[in-house]
Each structure stands twice: as C-alpha cells, then as structure tokens.
Amino acid sequence: QRRTLASLASLPLTPAASAYLDRRGLLEVAGSLRIGAVPDSPAPSLRHYAGRLVIPSLGPADNAYDVAFRCIRDHDCKAAECPKYLFLPGVDKRLYNLRALARAGGVIDITEGQLDAATMAACGLYAVGVPGAHSWHRHHRRLFQGFDRVRVWGDGDAAGKDFAKHVAEALPGADVMMVEWGQDINSMYVSEGREAILAIAEGGQDDPDDDVA
C-alpha cells in the first residue's frame, strides 16, 4: 500500500489537469502538494480513475498516507451522476495534509475538502482538510491541541455553516470563519484574490448565524 501511494503521489500533471488547476489558481502550489493526474489511458489498475486529478494526503515526513481522485471534467458531477471524488478501495478516508500541523506556527486552519485546504496554502496559510463532514471524528481534536488559534472555515451556504459548527464544537475556543454566501474558499480566492481570504482570516471570530441565512 505504501508503494502504491508513493507511486500515485509521483504522477505528473497532464495538460488537462494543469489547465484545471490554473483556472482554480492552484497551479503554483501543485508541485509542493505533489498533486498530479491519472493519464487518460492509464495502466489497467488505474483505469477506474482515468483523467482524474490525484491529490495525495501528505504526512509530516512528506509521506503519502491517502490519496483522492477528483473529477476535472467540465460538467456538473451530480447531474451527470459522476462521483466528484473517488478513493482507493480498502483505504480509510483520512484528514488531508497533516503535514501542515508540523509546519504551522501558532495558527492552524481547518477546511472542508482538499482543494480548499490547497487554496489556503496558495494564500500562505497552513490548513488541514476534512474530506466531507462525516469524516470528522471527535478524536481528531487531539491533533489541534497546543495551537494558539484554530480557525474552522465554512463555505457560504447552510451545509458549510453546519460543517463549521460541527467541527468547532469539538474544539473549544476555535474561531468559525464563514466566506460570503454562495461561495467557497476557492471560488472567493479566484474571484476576489488572496487578500479576500486573508481579510477573513485576520478578522475576529465570526458568528456563522450572522453570515448564513
């Protein structure tokens, strides 16, 4: 399994994947996060993931301990009945980018999803991503003890509010940071720039009930 994960974390970007990451403002951090892509005509063992982005979860020793395969096709995945994310069989979903815990100073961020955490990296911040609200477990709180400030980010919709509140309840003293209604971290980054993300990050604690109707 370690060899498989290491091999996946070494796959280069395809032209389509590079264009996709460029549109999302993440091409510059793809190398440091070891994001790659499965070729359109891969080996038989990867045929199920053909053309997908490869997003490895990296540990403190820069080792890959999990990997997510994200669809980058230009369609609405839900409408097309296409799973947005796929994972390796037999590998439990893990928190994304635990490497950030070892590299951050006194402040750590938590986002929902891998690419929002990658967006925080593009803003010069250190973030751990939770691959879906149901992937947060109460014992995860131990990882965030000892930080001066923990910021839990929610997308600007009801689901984002619920996620942020759910995680923050397990982390006494954590700040809940909500992006504007109708946006997520990456869409705000693309439309309004790095400064918009940093303005929220540098603000005080946000009450999600004030931001999400």
Image (cartoon, rainbow, N blue to C red):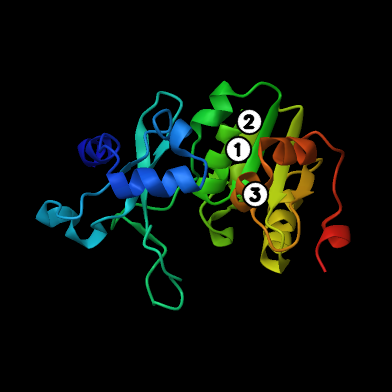
Q: Is residue 83 left or right of residue 103?
A: left
Q: Are marks 1 and 2 in contact (CB under 8 Å)?
A: yes
Comparing marks 1 and 3, which lies closer to the viewer? 3
- Marks 3 and 2, how far apart at CA: 18 Å
User: Does residue 77 appear in the picture of this structure?
Assistant: yes
Residue position marked by numbered label 2 in the rendering: 125
At mark 3, the secondary structure is: helix
Image coordinates of residue 53 in percent, x first then y, are 35, 50
Residue drawn at (67%, 66%) of the image:
159
Image coordinates of residue 93 in percent, x first then y, are 43, 52
Badge 2 amino acid: Leu
Residue drawn at (30%, 37%) of the image:
9
Q: Is residue 161 above or below residue 61?
A: below
Image coordinates of residue 143 in percent, x first then y, are 60, 35
Sequence-wise first label, 3 or 2: 2
Badge 1 amino acid: Met
Label 2 CA crowd tier, 10 Å (few <14, some 14–19, many 20+): some
Sequence-wise first label, 1 or 2: 1
